[in-house]
Image (tube, grey):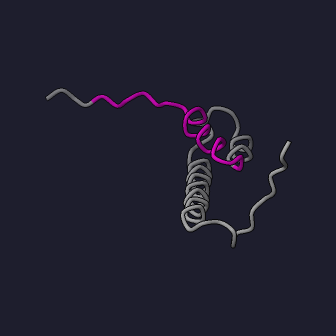
């Protein structure tokens, strides 16, 4: 079995560095969007507790995505008045 060693930043190619930076920006964007939504949204509009979702939001990629998919309650669609 071959043991893989971690590469240093200086050993990564340009595209690999760009990929790491892009994924980091996406992760932090999702995290901050989820945290802002949790803070802004009333507890009655969240499935589960705000504390639970705040903690789960820090789980890379999975936490914020899970919050946006399952954590927010779906409000009934507003119907437009018939003219």
Question: Where residue 42 appears, x then y in whole percent?
Answer: 58, 43
**What residue appears at the point 69 percent right and 73 percent down from the top-left corner?**
10
Per the image, is 61 magenta? yes
Magenta residues, as a range?
A: 58-79
* Magenta-colored stretch includes residue 34: no
Residue placed most toward the observer, 23 or 59: 23
In this picture, residue 81 sits left or right of residue 76:
left
In the depicted structure, whether residue 22 falls above or below residue 49: below
Identify the residue at the far left of this view: 83
Q: Please give left or right for residue 5 compared with residue 82 in the image.
A: right
Q: Which residue occupies the foreground of this view, 21 or 79?
A: 21
Residue depicted at 80% across the width and 52% down the height? 4
Q: Residue at x 55, y 60 (%)?
A: 22
Q: Residue furthest bottom?
A: 10
Q: Position of residue 49 (x, y in %)?
A: 70, 38
Which quadrant holds the N terminus?
Answer: top right
| For residue 29, side relative to residue 79 (left or right) | right
Rendering coords of residue 43 (x, y %)? 63, 40
**Residue 20, quarter of picture:** bottom right
Q: How many marks?
A: 0
Camera-nearest residue between 12 and 61: 12
Relative to 31, residue 47 above or below: above
Could you tell me which quadrant the C terminus lies in?
A: top left
Q: Position of residue 67 (x, y in %)?
A: 61, 39
């Amino acid at each position: 079995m071959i043991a893989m060693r971690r590469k240093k930043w200086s050993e990564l190619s340009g595209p690999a560095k760009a990929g790491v930076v892009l994924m980091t920006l996406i992760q932090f964007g999702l995290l901050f969007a989820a945290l802002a939504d949790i803070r802004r949204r009333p507890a009655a509009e969240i499935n589960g507790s705000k504390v639970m979702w705040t903690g789960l939001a820090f789980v890379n990629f999975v936490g914020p995505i899970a919050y946006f998919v399952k954590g927010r309650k779906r409000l009934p669609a507003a119907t437009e008045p018939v003219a």
